[in-house]
Image (cartoon, rainbow, N blue to C red):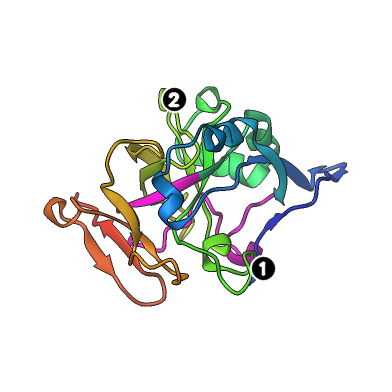
Amino acid sequence: MRSCFSKKYAAAHSSGGPQFSLFRYAEIKTGAQMNKSSQSIRAGFLRSIFYIICLSMFLTGCSSILKIQANFIPPGSLRLAQAIAVADRSFIIKSTDLYDAILSSGITDAEITDESVIAARIYCCGGVTYESSSEKVNEIMIFVPSGTKIEYGDIVEFKAGWPPKNGENGQINILTRVVQKLEGNGEQCWWDPKDDRLWLRTLYCDWMPKEGWVKQGGLDPAWYRPNIP
């Protein structure tokens, strides 16, 4: 499967709007480095480099599901992800599919600011090649409500969205809280299993079983908290 992300520095525009939009991206450390304190790591996030991303930002090879509506778990459930990139407001506005999905979920234009959308990874780490890895191909996007500051490498909790169905609007992934800072004290969360040789590890925290989180197996492994009406 082909990822929508490209590492070339360029932008193409047409009369109908930008075919590609710029996204600020910061490379994330993996495995045991996830919680390592480092000023250079944070500086790398603040500097951010530009990547080109598909305008529609569809999941897994530009398919029909937007990354901001992708879930891999039951809709409305809670899941964890690790922040790897942040978008400017201008990028969000120019990315018509992304912008429309946000508005159709009930969020107003005034609520969309710089850093309102982040990219995050739900799997770790790597593969035969990085571009074809589950880590890369299954990256998702999450809307961040105003008042919450997300930093490079933070582990965040979000409520899983869903794509449109039967003529009804879908819902986007929305951040609910920051669970663990990259440079936080103590390790409560990690990529599970703790084996850097594995390619399809998912985030786990030691408090999950007590708080009603369950493990999903199969091709899309995950720890999640079911949606409780």
User: Which comes sooner in the sequence, label 1 or label 2?
Assistant: 1
Of the pair 169 and 18, the residue shown nearer to us = 18
Q: Residue at x 39, y 39 (%)?
A: 175
Magenta region, residue range: 54-83
Placement of 23 over or under 226, stated as above or below:
above
In the image, residue 147 lies in the stretch drawn in magenta? no
What x and y, as percent, mark residue 105? Answer: 46, 41
What element does badge 2 sit on?
A: loop
The disc label shown at residue 146, or none: 2
Judge the density around disc 2: few (<14), some (14-19), many (≥20) Cα neighbours within 10 Å: few
Question: Which amino acid type is marked by label 1?
Answer: Arg
Rendered image quadrant of residue 16: top right
The disc label shown at residue 2, or none: 1
The disc label shown at residue 150, or none: none
Q: Residue at x 44, y 57 (%)?
A: 31
Of the pair 62 and 102, the residue shown nearer to us = 62
* Left/right of residue 177 with respect to residue 109 in the rendered view: left
Compute the Cα span from label 1 to label 2. Answer: 33 Å
Q: Is residue 171 visible?
A: no
Is most of the magenta stretch helix, strand or loop? Answer: loop
- Farthest residue toward the left? 210
